Image (cartoon, rainbow, N blue to C red):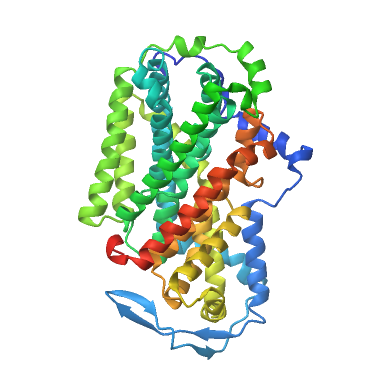
Amino acid sequence: MSITSLPPAPAHAAQAAHAAPAAEVAEVAASPRFRLKLPNTFVLIFGLLVLIAVLTWFVPGGKYATVMVEGKPVIDPTSYQPVPSHPQGPAAVLMAPIKGFVEAGLIIGFVLIVGGAFAVLQATQAIDALIKSVAKAHERSALVRTLLIPGFVLLFSLGGATFGMAEEAIPFVLIFVPLALALRYDTFIGVAIPFVGSQVGFATAFLNPFNVGVAQGLAGLPLFSGLGYRFVCWLVFTAVTIAFLMWHAARIRRQPEISACFQDDQRRRADLDLAAMREFTGIQTRQRLVLLAFAGTLVTMMVGVVKYGWYIEEIAAVFLAMAILVGVLARMGAGLWVQHFLAGAKDLAGTALIIALAKGTVVLMRDAQIIDSLLHSLAPLVASEHATLALYKMFGIQSVINFFIHSGTGQAALTMPVMAPLSDLVNVSRQSAILAFQFGELTTPIIPTSGITVGVLSLARIPFGRWVRWMLPLQVAFVVLALVMLAIPVLAPQWVGW
């Protein structure tokens, strides 16, 4: 029996939501509240290619020598020497993407395989069934009612921290907003559980192949190295998020009228229909097996990375094995399996091209021999008397870049080839530089240039200004926490092991 013959999940709005966000984003982007419209990531990076080509005619060439430190090449900051530059013309710009594709081939192949594997997993509806099962239990158990917000935030945050859940959280808004209203919370809680939960997990990820994995590969570090401290960061940020949402939820249950969404929520409650949630009969046996296979995959990956030093090839093989096993457990025919896998890989084709374009910028600068001269110029701007301040400047730069480029993979591919060697020059570890890059994405929930943010708020019908005012205390907490967590590896490296 193929997966198409499995009993259908209950019909509700979320099943149609995967197609909805694009239309909603377009509608909101055209509205007066969202006048700011920037070129997409492809246009920005290709424009950067052109800009770099122009700069190669004006920026002098330069070169640092490298020395081996614990088996890794590290820049010698005292070795800079001017060298002749090689200006790049239009032909070089047009060839840069294909050269970047070749040089980033391993990372690109990894991204496509992982995307295909998760498409097969999502086709089983096992994760969706898990969420509905927990929500239904809320009606029967006081313990579940107490743990519902922490449990779901933890689940979505874990998704962001392990497999890069971001856009995938958008349709869940259509489940959690009605659920939150039925439980006497407000729309903010319904949006924040899947959206803020997944975004915090993504920004503090410890096993996310799309930002941490790509960044470490480009920085020349072992895949998912430094996992222990990143896991601590994820726990801290997730715990703070849960505490904030629990505090707000408790206030709203006591005094619902204090919610900025109170009037709108009252109208929504009058039309609320929880029939679809009540009709849910539980997780099917095959879906339970699929969830066990997924959990086993994560455990296998962690053990392989920590104990055996697995790299991109091994991790890609684990995800491919998971996809095959999930297909067998779901009795998915070979043709349907290939269809889902290719659809998932196709969804990440744009990400693969972004990586190639971003890598092409490095190819242009390297061929022109201006990378080291740019590093030589940037070092005084980032450098400070204390390495912590230099790291804070990196964090600020990454936060600004996140306003314009929202692909974690694209940001990593674009910034890490510069930030990694720059960290050597300013006495900051490359692991810390990657952490600063990650934390730069903490601003995503409140920036109007993010398609995810705009799409989520459109689905929930929350004005952007109202959302930002509600999120502001949590965002301030995020910034303070980021500064603290960035300082610890510098001030107490023995605690971190970097």
Taking 13 as reference, is 205 left or right? left
Outermost residue on the left side: it is 307
Instruction: Identify which residue, 57 or 236, lies in the foreground.
Output: 236
- Taking 13 as reference, is 46 above or below it? below
Quadrant of res 44: bottom right
Q: Is residue 243 left or right of residue 207?
A: right
The N terminus sits in image quarter: top left
Closest to the observer: 267 or 125? 267
* Vertical side of 434 occupied by 387: above or below: below
| Residue 86 point in image, percent of width and height | 59, 82
Question: Which of 420/255 is in front?
Answer: 255
Q: Is residue 157 left or right of residue 349?
A: left
User: Visible in this render: residue 303?
Assistant: yes
Does residue 352 appear anywhere in the picture? no
Of all residues, the one furthest to the front in this rendering is 254
In the image: residue 106, left or right of residue 268 = left
Q: Residue at x 27, y 74 (%)?
A: 71
Residue located at (43% from left, 60% from top): 486
Which quarter of the figure is the C terminus placed in?
bottom left
Percent of width and height locating residue 368: 57, 79
Asked whether 222 or 354 is in front, the reply is: 222
In x, y percent, where is residue 127? Answer: 39, 28
Q: How many marks?
A: 0
Residue 55 percent across, percent down from the top left: 66, 76
